Amino acid sequence: MLRDAPGGVADWRSAVTILIVDDEEIVRGVLRDMCESAGCAVLTAKDGKEGVEAFREHAPEISLVMLDMTMPHMGGPETFQAIRKIQPDARVVLMSGHNEVEAASRFVGKGLAGFLQKPISLSSPYGKMQEVLD
């Protein structure tokens, strides 16, 4: 889920490719639109299995993966591991409705690039992308 936030669209811009893996169509769509408005190319996947397939196919061009924690077919932890087997230094930002400590604790020491708390404010992805990519 996404929620409104004061401040509107950030001025940050980047020409990187981002893979968004989330089972909620509305979340994928809004994040895709936000990333595209910042100049990014975007790939989307509706679950972990699709996400791993997309990453395998496009790994050299993907700069960042935005990954939901809880999805059907293959959850966030399994998807993260599969992506890291393909590219050990892949940058992955976890998105979850669980609190950061609880959700990210499953990834301690595994190189998670960042965390976005759901519901995601409309300004927080820009800050996280800038932090991870710059």
Image (cartoon, rainbow, N blue to C red):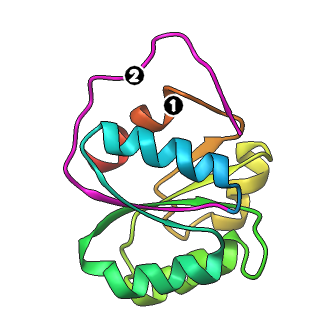
Q: Which mark is residue 114?
A: none
On whether residue 14 falls in the magenta region, the answer is: yes
Which percent across, then down, holds residue 111?
Answer: 48, 66
**Which residue occupies the foreground of this view, 105 or 92?**
92
> 40 or 131: nearer the eye?
40
**Residue lying at 64% horizontally and 66% vertically, measured from the top left:** 107
- The x, y position of residue 50, in whole percent, is 57, 80
Residue at 27 percent across and 30 percent down: it is: 12
Residue situated in front as seen by the camera: 18 or 101: 18
SS for dot 1? helix
Image position of 12 (left or right of 2) = left
Q: Which residues are magenta?
A: 1-22
133 up-or-down from 20: above or below: above
Q: Magenta segment: does it hold 27? A: no
Dot in front, 2 or 1: 2
Q: Earlier in the sequence, mark 2 or mark 1?
A: 2
Which residue, given by chain and number where applicable, does mark 1 sit on? 124
- Type of amino acid at the residue the image marks with label 1: Ser
